[in-house]
Amino acid sequence: MVDLTGRTALVTGGSRGIGRAIALALAQRGANVAINFFRNRSAAQETVDAIEAHGVKGRAYRANVAHEEQLHKLFDEFKQDFDRLDVLISNAASGVLKPALELTRRHWEWTMDINAATLLHLVQHAFPLMQDGGKVVAISSLGSVRAINNYAAVGASKAALESLVRHLAVELAPENINVNILSAGTVDTDALKHFPNREEILQGSREKTPAGRLVTPDEVADSALFLVSDYARMIHGQTLVVDGGYSIVA
Ligand SMILES: NC(=O)c1ccc[n+]([C@@H]2O[C@H](COP(=O)([O-])OP(=O)(O)OC[C@H]3O[C@@H](n4cnc5c(N)ncnc54)[C@H](OP(=O)(O)O)[C@@H]3O)[C@@H](O)[C@H]2O)c1
C-alpha cells in the first residue's frame, strides 16, 4: 500500500483523462494535490472536488504550460497555497498531428516546446520546493520509439522528453529526486478525438494488445503510484511502459 500522507503533488493537465486519474490516485493515498488545466475550468473544479472528497487539500491553477510567464504565475499561486512539493507529474501535452511532409517549422517548434521544453521549466521551478527530495514523472507515449501515422512531431517531442528525463535524472539523483518516464499505450481519452484516424488507432490497439483490451487511465495511475512511492527509490531515468504488452509484439 502506497502511503502519501503529508506529501504534496502537482499534476499538469490534471483536470481530465490520464492526469485526472493520477491526481485522484495520489489524493486517495493521502497526498494534497494541485492540478493545472488550460481551457476547461469546470472540469478542473470537478476534479478538485473529487480530490477533496478524499479528505486532502486540492487546488487548480489555470496556465498554458508552454508559456513561461504563465508557468511562473502557476508556481507563484502554488507557493501561496502549499509550502512544499514532493511529487511532480508532467502530464499535459499537445502538438500538431499531421503527416511529416505537411509539418511546418511552426508546427514543429510548438510541439517540441510544449511537450519537451516544458518539463525543463517545470523542474526548474519545482526543484527549490523539493527540499526533502522528490519524485518527477513525465508522461510519454510509444510514439517516442515507434512510427505512428500523423505522429511525427509529437513522437519526436516525446523522444526529446525521454532524453531530457535521463539527463535530469542524473543531475537530480544526488538531490534525492527520482526522475522517470511513464509511457502509455493507447488510452481512450478525449485526446484521441484530435486524431483523424481515431477509430483505426482504437481498433488496431485492441487487436494487437496481448492483454486483449486497452489500458485504462486508472491503470496508468497505478503505475504512477509505484514510481512516486518509496518502492521505486532506486529507479532513476527509466521508462516504465504500460501498454498491455502492445509494444513487444513483433
Ligand atoms: N490518450 C492516449 O492514448 C495516450 C497514450 C500515451 C500517452 N499519453 C499522454 O498522456 C498525457 C495525457 O493525455 P490524455 O490522453 O489524458 O489527454 P486529455 O484527456 O486530452 O487531457 C489533457 C489535459 O491536459 C490539459 N492541457 C491541454 N493543453 C494544455 C496546456 N497547453 N497547458 C496546460 N494544460 C493543458 C487539459 O486541460 P484543459 O481541458 O483545461 O485544456 C487536460 O487536463 C499526455 O502527455 C499524452 O501524450 C496519452
Image (cartoon, rainbow, N blue to C red):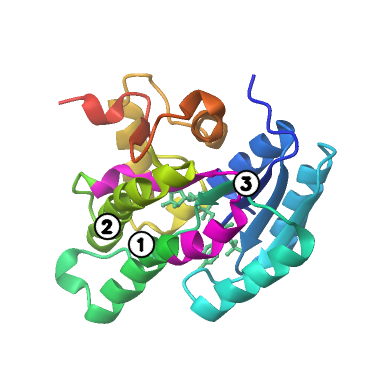
Q: Residue at x 34, y 58 (%)?
A: 196
Query: Which one is in front, 99 or 235?
Result: 235
Inspect this view and state whether residue 94 appears: no
Mark positioned earlier in the residue sequence (1 or 2): 1
Mark positioned earlier in the residue sequence (1 or 3): 3
The residue beneath circle 2 is 160
User: Label 2 vs label 3: CA separation?
Assistant: 24 Å
Whether ligand 1 has any atom under 8 Å from the Cβ at mark 3 is answered as: yes
Q: Residue at x 69, y 41 (%)?
A: 7
Q: In the picture provided, is 12 more to the left or to the right than 83?
A: left
The residue beneath circle 3 is 20
User: Label 1 vs label 2: CA separation?
Assistant: 6 Å
Query: Which one is in front, 207 or 223?
Result: 223
Mark positioned earlier in the residue sequence (2 or 3): 3
Inspect this view and state whether residue 180 appears: yes
Q: Where is 237 relative to 103, above or below?
A: above
Residue 118 in the image: x percent, y percent?
43, 65
Where is the C terminus found, in terms of image quarters?
A: top left
The kind of residue on which mark 3 rests is Arg
Say which mark, if any, is on residue 58.
none
The residue beneath circle 1 is 116
Magenta segment: 121-144
Does the stretch in magenta take in 246? no
